[in-house]
Image: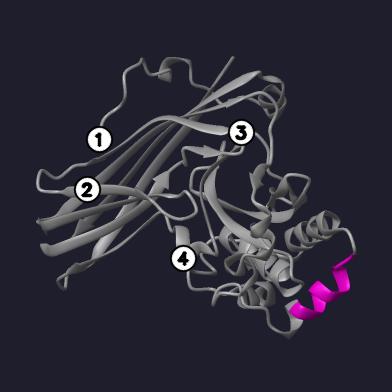
Amino acid sequence: MTWTAGASPDAALRLPSRQELQEAGKLTYVLHQRFRYTYDAPVRDLNHRLVVVPPRQHGDQRRRRHSITVHDADARTTQRQDATGNTITRSRVPLVSDGVEFAVEAIVERVGAISDVLLPAAALTDPRLLRPTRLTAADSAIHGLAAAMTGPDRLATAERFCEYVHEAIRYAHGVTSIATTAAEALAGGRGVCQDTAHVMIALCRATGLPARYVSGHLLGEGGTHAWVEVIVADAAGARAVAFDPCHGRRAGRDYLTVATGRDYTDVAPTSGTYVGTARGTLSATKRVGVVLA
């Protein structure tokens, strides 16, 4: 896969203020991301999954161009859209002697004021957004909190959940893992954006409020970010309203959505399997900039 025709706006890239982002009539986001796996011995039958390309359309986001390059001549790479519009890339390599690298580039545009994602009314009763997963299952503490904070206004309830999670979980790297559940994270009171998203989703689903996990990028942060979309009724059916419980606020134009799912497991940016006894080490780099117009 290669870039479509057109010049890259890299030369004009910068990191605007939140006020500049809100006032700009048009935004062009440019994403560069690399994942490199190194192995201490050869591995066979590498089967790798990437969820790193922003969707063709998500609310006011429009993907204009993208590419994924696998730095291995024998790699066979395919791409598809799943049922929710996520772009899933799979790469298979018969033999990796010592390492493999994936390079991602994408250009995404926003024009006009930020808008929520419009969905069909069926999203309000979608079992995928209402049923707990292993990572978002509510224990007695979460059920009690959800009951105490739930009111007649669904959006106001989501606001309370977002504020509560922001206050209840202090950001701390390395104390949780991708296997940490919402109940465990809340009990420990520390975690990362993935944990705060899982806790807020658990609160929402415990009270019958459909919600989904969002994977993407927050301008100015080095790694992948995670937040939540809460589904509420709308005159046209339903809409997804984005909240970031890690920062205790609504998600704005400094957020770039890549994928949505039930929890982290659905949209892990990079995952895979291989045959062999070698140990693998992942290193990653990312740069996201914006051109204002």
Please report the bounds of the magenta region as a residue range: 143-151
The nearer-to-camera label among 2 and 4 is: 2
Badge 1 density bin: few <14, some 14–19, many ≥20, Cα 10 Å? few
Q: Which residue is denoted by mark 2 in the rendering?
A: 77
Q: CA distance from mark 1 to mark 2?
A: 9 Å
Mark 3 or mark 2, which has the lower sequence index?
3
Q: Which residue is denoted by mark 1 in the rendering?
A: 1
- The numbered disc on residue 265 is 4
In what element is the residue under mark 2? Answer: strand
In what element is the residue under mark 3? Answer: loop
Q: Residue 111 appears at what percent x and percent y? A: 61, 23
Badge 4 density bin: few <14, some 14–19, many ≥20, Cα 10 Å? some
Query: In this image, 152 relative to 217: left or right?
Result: right
Q: Which residue is denoted by mark 3 in the rendering?
A: 60
The reply to whether dot 1 and dot 2 touch (C-beta < 8 Å) is yes
Question: Residue at image x 74%, y 65%?
Answer: 209
Q: Residue 18 appears at what percent x and percent y? A: 69, 29
Q: Quadrant of residue 150?
A: bottom right
Q: Amino acid at mark 2?
A: Thr
Query: In this image, 115 relative to 282: left or right?
Result: right
Q: Residue 275 appears at what percent x and percent y? A: 16, 70
Q: Amino acid at mark 4?
A: Thr
The nearer-to-camera label among 4 and 3 is: 3
Mark 1 or mark 4, which has the lower sequence index?
1
Q: Amino acid at mark 1?
A: Met
Vertical comparison of 109 with 1: above or below = above
